[in-house]
Amino acid sequence: MVKSLLVRAHAKINFYLNVTGKRPDGYHDIETVFHSIGLHDDVTLRRLSKPEILIQCNHPSVPCDAQNLGYRAAQLLMIHTDSRYGVDISIKKRIPPAGGLAGGSANAAAVLRGMNELFEFGLSQPELMCLGLQLGADVPFCLLGGAAIGRGVGEILTPLPALKETHLLLTNQGIEVRTGWAFQHLHFALTNRPLDDIIVRGFLEHGDRRGLAENMYNCLEIPVFLKFPDIEALKCELASCHGSYGALMSGSGATVFSVMQDAASADQVSAGLSERFAFCTTTTTSSVGLSLA
Ligand code: ATP
């Protein structure tokens, strides 16, 4: 048995997000188009001989205790498998927290997949996804990766063809938007643009980046932009910058991404945004990647 593993936990963006209803349990039904991106955290897992969980993270606003989604994933898996061993988790964050990029969910997915490998638990992908859903609505997609339509709370996944490597520019001004707040302040009457999944599938299959970018939509922009006009201003700036096909807020924000024509335009625009978090990345087919630490 190997003693430690390095797991790449990839972030996601949403090319489309609509809320279709409120459920009796207080959660919302959504329809979304997820896509994994190259930006990732490094999650290192080390086997411990006692059933305990240690955790550290290099980002000051991420909790280093039982509230961390990575910790909760380890705890859930250890209870589920009645594990005699424990794990030491170290998270090197690159994904901005509370940024609409599913950073916490990606870490949870990395711990589930990584521990399953490290301890040879032998759980199947559907079993891991089922456990993941107990931790967060985005965890099942973070385990699947690539591109998919998400329905229900985001856990009913229909895989889509992943977009050929596409250059993206991500920006985040350090504003943390709480996902629950954004959903609570949504005005249903103002937000209803149904998903045409055949058209989206066509854009992805044919690598039609312009078509995809021109049809992007996120209903959560309405409440978020009302409270944080700076995020809307950033979106307008990105949408009209040189080499951009279009821009959108990801998830509940605050990260805004732009679909770029090429790497050179992405680099050039990102250099002009240096005082804010600006990150050039690409779409990817990866979810969580494992390697020996
Ligand atoms: P989503 O898009 O899934 O709604 P998000 O990208 O907006 O999520 P996260 O990065 O997952 O947001 O962080 C949301 C909150 O979760 C943070 O404010 C943080 O306090 C908490 N959190 C717990 N564990 C983690 C983790 N491992 N990484 C990041 N945040 C975490």
Image: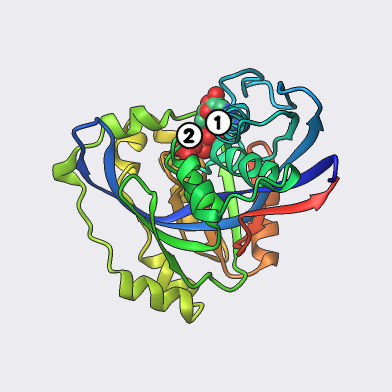
Q: Nearer the viewer, mark 2 or mark 1?
A: 1
Q: Secondary structure at mark 1?
A: helix
Q: Is residue 86 left or right of residue 231?
A: right
Residue located at (40% from left, 78% from top): 202
Question: Where residue 135 is drawn, which disc sits there?
Answer: 2
Residue type at mark 2: give it.
Answer: Leu
Labels 2 and 1 touching (C-beta < 8 A): yes
- Image x and y of residue 27, in percent: 28, 35
The quarter of the picture showing ligand 1:
top right
Q: Which of the 4 image quadrants contains residue 178?
A: top left
- Image x and y of residue 102, in percent: 52, 41
Q: Is residue 254 left or right of residue 221?
A: right
Please tell me which residue lies in front, 137 or 14. 137
- How would you rate the neighbour count of disc 2 (Cα within 10 Å): few for under 14, some for 14-19, many for 20 or more? many
Q: Is residue 58 visible?
A: yes
N-terminal of the two: label 2 or label 1? 1
Q: Secondary structure at mark 2?
A: loop
Residue that label 1 marks: 76
- How would you rate the neighbour count of disc 1 (Cα within 10 Å): few for under 14, some for 14-19, many for 20 or more? some
> Marks 2 and 1, how far apart in space?
9 Å
Image height of 158 relative to 56, above or below: below
Q: Quadrant of the C terminus?
A: top right
- Image x and y of residue 257, in percent: 52, 52
Question: Where residue 64 is drawn, which disc sits there?
Answer: none
Q: Residue furthest top?
A: 65
